[in-house]
């Protein structure tokens, strides 16, 4: 086998990292869901969001992803709203399932409570308004809409 690095080449020594690396939770790249792309600054730096933005993106992603459909997501990630499509359930059943699916989809260590869940069924459109409370005290109201 040929030698890839000539023996006369001196390689720099690689020292192990001795200082711990601090992980910052709650900081993530910003994502534009309407265009399905990451956001960059004018100087091509990736734009980062704070804890509130990151949690909001996670919740939106959970609600718009089919649970147990993609193998690279954990089993608890995503929602089951796709199971209601075309089933012709009465509005009372849809409301019950919608509330349950919202609570299941918004499972995250950073979320302490999902409250003020209001489900409205108008024809084949289900609209759910709810408020998510984070561990840090951050609260945000969301509105999700599906066609069943």
Image (cartoon, rainbow, N blue to C red):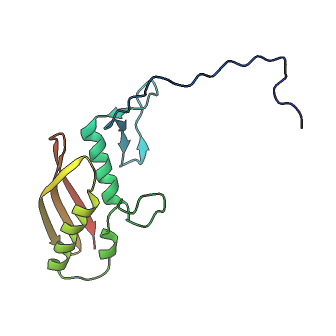
Residue extending farthest right:
1
Q: In the picture shown, does residue 133 fall above or below 5? A: below
- Nearest the eye: 148 or 17: 17
Q: Position of residue 2 (x, y in %)?
A: 89, 34
Q: Position of residue 69 (x, y in %)?
A: 44, 67
Q: Position of residue 103 (x, y in %)?
A: 22, 62
Q: In the picture shown, does residue 5 fall above or below 37? A: above
**Which corner quadrant of the image does residue 19 belong to?**
top left
Quadrant of the image containing the N terminus: top right
Residue at horizontal 28%, vertical 74%?
Answer: 148
Q: In the picture shown, does residue 49 fall above or below 130? A: above
Residue at horizontal 48%, vertical 62%?
Answer: 71
Residue at horizontal 36%, vertical 38%?
Answer: 28
Q: Position of residue 64 (x, y in %)?
A: 34, 59
**Which corner quadrant of the image does residue 106 belong to?**
bottom left
**Which corner quadrant of the image does residue 87 belong to?**
bottom left
Q: Image check: 148 left or right of 33?
A: left
């Amino acid at each position: 086998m040929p030698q890839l690095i000539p023996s006369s080449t001196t390689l720099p020594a690689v020292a192990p990292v001795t200082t711990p690396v601090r992980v910052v939770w709650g900081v993530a790249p910003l994502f534009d869901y309407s265009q399905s792309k990451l956001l960059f600054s004018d100087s091509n730096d990736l734009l980062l969001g704070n804890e509130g933005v990151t949690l909001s993106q996670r919740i939106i992603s959970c609600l718009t992803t089919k649970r147990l459909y993609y193998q690279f997501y954990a089993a608890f990630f995503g929602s089951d709203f796709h199971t209601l499509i075309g089933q012709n359930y009465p509005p009372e059943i849809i409301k019950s399932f919608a509330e349950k699916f919202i609570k299941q989809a918004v499972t995250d260590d950073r979320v302490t409570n999902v409250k003020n869940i209001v489900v409205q069924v108008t024809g084949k459109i289900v609209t759910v308004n709810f408020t998510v409370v984070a561990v840090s005290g951050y609260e945000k109201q969301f509105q999700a809409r599906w066609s069943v």
